[in-house]
């Protein structure tokens, strides 16, 4: 997957869910990628759907796993979903639909 750059916590970060991260996301959330996307898209998600999507997408874009876990602990855990949902949703939309429309049209 082509990384998508989003503001998260302390600045802009790249996010990418590649095949390895998708497989791990499915394990961590005990669901298929289709089910996870559906839950997030219709806002029937669990906290782990959001946190694990962000953590694994940071890793998929090259972030060290410890740093990704630290960022999620600081900027996802205990934070309002209005701050974290849009990030996870955009990551999963990119997995499901491809590059964001505005990036693809350039």
Image: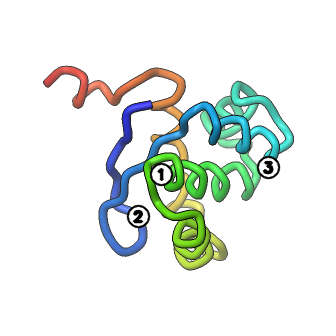
Q: Which residue sits at x=51%, y=46%? A: 60
Question: To which residue does mark 2 refer?
Answer: 8
- Placement of 60 over or under 104, stated as above or below: below
* SS at circle 1: helix
Direction from residue 34 to residue 81 in the image, left or right: left
Q: Earlier in the sequence, mark 2 or mark 1?
A: 2
* SS at circle 3: helix
Q: Earlier in the sequence, mark 1 or mark 3?
A: 3
Residue 100 in sight in this render: yes
Q: Are marks 2 and 1 in contact (CB under 8 Å)?
A: yes
Q: Which residue sits at x=64%, y=53%? A: 50
**Chosen colour scheme:** rainbow
Q: Tag count in the figure?
A: 3
Question: To which residue does mark 1 refer?
Answer: 87
The C terminus sits in image quarter: top left
The N terminus sits in image quarter: top left
Q: Which residue sits at x=60%, y=34%? A: 41
Q: Residues within 10 Å of mark 2 (few under 14, many from 20)?
A: some
* SS at circle 2: strand
C-alpha span from label 2 to label 1: 8 Å
Question: To which residue does mark 3 refer?
Answer: 28
Q: Nearer the viewer, mark 1 or mark 3?
A: 3
C-alpha span from label 3 to label 2: 21 Å
Q: Position of residue 7 (x, y in %)?
A: 34, 60
For residue 1, the mark is: none
Q: Position of residue 59 (x, y in %)?
A: 53, 54
C-alpha span from label 1 to label 3: 18 Å
Q: Earlier in the sequence, mark 3 or mark 2?
A: 2
Residue 80 in sight in this render: no
């Amino acid at each position: 997957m082509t990384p998508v750059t989003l503001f998260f916590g302390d600045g802009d970060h790249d996010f990418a869910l590649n095949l390895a991260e998708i497989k791990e996301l499915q394990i961590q959330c005990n669901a298929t990628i289709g089910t996870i996307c559906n839950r997030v898209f219709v806002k029937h998600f669990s906290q782990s759907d959001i946190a694990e999507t962000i953590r694994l997408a940071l890793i998929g874009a090259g972030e060290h796993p410890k740093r990704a876990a630290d960022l999620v602990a600081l900027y996802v855990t205990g934070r309002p979903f209005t701050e974290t949902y849009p990030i996870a949703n955009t990551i999963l939309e990119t997995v499901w639909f491809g590059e964001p429309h505005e990036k693809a049209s350039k």
